[in-house]
Amino acid sequence: MTRKTVAVTGATSGIGKALAELYAQKGWNVAAAGRNLASMDALARQYPNVLPVACDVTRPDDCQNLVAQSLERFGRLDVLINNAGISMRANFADLDVEVLQKVMDVNFWGTVYCTKAALDALKRTQGTVVGISSIAGFQGLPGRTGYCASKFAMHGFLETLRIETAADGVKVLIVAPGYTASAIRERALNERAVPQGESPRNENKMMRAEAVAQAVFNAVQKRRRTLVLTPAGKAVVAVKKFFPALADKLVAREVGKEQ
């Protein structure tokens, strides 16, 4: 049987790295994309079925190159996982609008550029587009206007893409992890667009990236449309649907615990 191929953006750490490792262990060909090529080179030395690709998802040419290298090396593309992402933490009244632009460039436009580059290849294999989003794509969170806007935009883009490509056999999966232990909070931009360098939450109490990766792998295999993770995340989405004002109060209280 021909090995299937997955391309994972943001594969240098966190959920992206866990996804690349899991797919490699499952015997898939993996195009591991990210800006830190050294980290992915180490993964490629461990798994010969991993192709490290330097890729900044805010650059359309890099996204085209990711797909081109995947097809040149492996001959096909079955799954694209748009995982590359960046967060921010500051009240809107205090921040420079540049912060929102940077977050949108990575989270939204990065998803658009990579998906556009991969779409024809995915149509040929009747493959799957995955967007690693967030509960912030369902519910606004104080201090994260740019992050929430980017995830809401991602949802709208992917939901529409699902309808447009249904006749081609392409599947679209939107994944909303809850709080997951990773470096995303340490790298979150402050009001001046500078990484904050620390997490405001206890990372030890969060879902592990490896558990998220396994859940995503299973959801792709089952051709699911949406995957919401963690009990707290599922609760927020449910409350938002039926009691939106209550959801606002609950997230304000929870996020208010952060320093």
Image: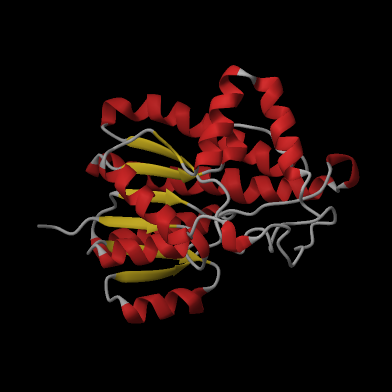
- How many marks do you count on the picture? 0
Question: Residue at 33% across / 63% down in the picture?
Answer: 22
Which quarter of the rendering shows the C terminus? Answer: bottom right
Query: Which image quarter: residue 67?
Result: bottom left
- Residue 25 x, y percent position in the rendering: 27, 67
- Left or right: residue 169 versus residue 194 is left
Would you say residue 214 is visible in this rendering? yes
Tell me: residue 5, above or below residue 235.
below
Query: Which image quarter: residue 167?
Result: top left
- Residue 42 x, y percent position in the rendering: 42, 80
Q: Residue furthest left?
A: 1
73 vs 23, nearest the viewer:
23
- Left or right: residue 38 versus residue 139 is left
76 vs 204, nearest the viewer:
204
Tell me: residue 126, above or below residue 186.
above
Q: Residue furthest right?
A: 94
Tell me: residue 162, above or below residue 206.
above
